[in-house]
């Protein structure tokens, strides 16, 4: 937190000044004893004065109200996360045949779908979300929309297909983002437009025209960060039953986290590794509130002013209830 008018914080000096003044008055009054001829009255006064918390609570609240008010005068401001009204996220999902592997339960694709459903439940409602799948070639399944029901329907229709064309998928996702936010969208201080691509893949590129690095370059030039998720374990195996690859057998299907890390680093995104359904859920949930937000400073003087008023009212209420008086 910082202050736009820090010199006005000198007002906070009133807090210790008022406290010292009250202590001085209390000590001065103690120097002048009063003679009581009625012992019953004296006992009552002594008992009342022994309840020290009643005497000091109104004063403590009054001093706290002064502190809040003094802080408000300094015009404090703090970083706040905000999302643009045109913010767009494109979920780019690998639907290659290896997504049938069950090293991540129930299958890699099944775990990814559940995680994407959780993402849709948590991402801010005004953020537009689109869906692009890629196998041998990319396919736009859902254009960016704020309608979560349409997105959930698109995610539910995902099915494993054949190869892996990461570069071409990135190209399609970039074009989808730019079609939503505009090709001349304003960029933030980090060079990013109010958009992001979340790329989930479980293997190395086997198909396509563009390489993953070429696809990442397109995203970088457009100012779109790509957050990558490498799904699957190193011991993942795909059991073929005579379809998919055309003959029976088992095949290792390892993810390619190195390539995905490169994509994220080139575009200013973050790379994640998910080797379980719980982990992929956690990644998507954490991304739901971060991929399209940016930090900006906001003045919060009203927060402190409101707190000062509330605490001052509390001080007056306690003083009235206890019969004590404020300075």
Image (spheres, rainbow, N blue to C red):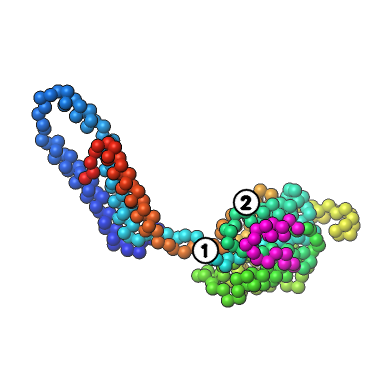
- Categorize mark 2 by other alpha carbons within 10 Å: few (<14), some (14-19), many (20+): some
The image position of residue 242, as x and y in percent, is: 89, 55
User: In the rendered structure, which disc, 2 or 1, sits on the residue that comes first in sequence?
Assistant: 2
Q: Is residue 263 magenta?
A: no
The residue located at (26%, 32%) in the rendering is: 51
- Mark 1 neighbour density, 10 Å: few (under 14) some (14–19) many (20 or more): some
- Residue 107, compared with residue 290, is above or below; it is above
User: Which quarter of the image is occupied by the C terminus?
Assistant: top left
The spot of residue 29 in percent (x, y) is: 14, 38
Q: Is residue 288 left or right of residue 246?
A: left
Residue located 67% across and 55% down the image: 116
Q: Secondary structure at mark 2?
A: helix
Residue at the disc numbered 1: 294
Q: Nearer the viewer, residue 213 or 52?
A: 52
Report the magenta residues as a range: 138-157
Q: Locate residue 4: give its quadrant.
A: bottom left
Q: Is residue 326 left or right of residue 156?
A: left
Quarter of the N terminus within the rendering:
bottom left
Q: Residue at x 61, y 75 (%)?
A: 183
Residue 278 horizontal/vertical position (percent): 66, 48
Residue topped by disc 2: 282
View extreme (top): residue:
39
> Relative to the observer, which residue lies in front, 81 or 192?
81
**Residue visible at 24% across and 37% down in the picture:** 323
Identify the element where label 1 is drawn: strand
Name the side, left or right, on which 78 lies relative to 137: left
Give the alpha-carbon distance from disc 2 to disc 1, as whole Å. 21 Å
The picture places residue 59, in percent across and down from the top left corner, at 26, 43
């Amino acid at each position: 937190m910082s202050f736009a008018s820090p010199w006005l914080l000198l007002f906070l000096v009133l807090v210790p000044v008022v406290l010292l003044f009250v202590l001085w008055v209390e000590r001065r009054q103690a120097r002048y004893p009063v003679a009581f001829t009625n012992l019953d009255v004296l006992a009552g006064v002594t008992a009342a004065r022994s309840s020290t918390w009643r005497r000091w609570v109104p004063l403590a609240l009054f001093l706290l109200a002064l502190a809040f008010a003094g802080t408000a005068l300094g015009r404090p401001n703090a970083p706040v996360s905000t999302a643009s009204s045109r913010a767009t996220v494109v979920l780019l999902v690998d639907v290659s045949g290896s997504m049938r592997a069950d090293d991540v339960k129930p299958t890699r694709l099944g775990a990814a779908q559940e995680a994407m459903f959780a993402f849709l439940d948590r991402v801010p409602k005004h953020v537009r979300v689109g869906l692009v799948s890629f196998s041998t070639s990319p396919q736009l399944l859902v254009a960016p929309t704020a309608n979560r029901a349409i997105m959930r329907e698109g995610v539910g229709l995902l099915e494993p297909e054949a190869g892996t064309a990461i570069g071409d998928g990135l190209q399609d996702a970039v074009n989808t983002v730019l079609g939503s936010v505009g090709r001349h969208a304003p960029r933030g201080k980090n060079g990013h437009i109010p958009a992001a691509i979340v790329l989930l893949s479980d293997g190395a590129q086997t198909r396509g025209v563009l390489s993953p690095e070429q696809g990442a370059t397109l995203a970088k030039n457009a100012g779109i960060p790509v957050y990558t998720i490498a799904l699957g374990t190193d011991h993942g195996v795909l059991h073929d039953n005579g379809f998919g690859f055309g003959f029976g057998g088992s095949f290792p299907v390892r993810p390619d986290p190195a390539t995905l890390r490169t994509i994220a680093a080139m575009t200013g995104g973050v790379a994640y590794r998910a080797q379980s359904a719980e982990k992929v859920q956690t990644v998507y949930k954490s991304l739901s509130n971060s991929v399209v937000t940016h930090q900006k400073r906001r003045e919060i003087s009203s927060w402190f002013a409101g707190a000062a008023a509330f605490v001052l009212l509390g001080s007056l209420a306690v003083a009235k209830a206890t019969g004590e008086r404020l300075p």
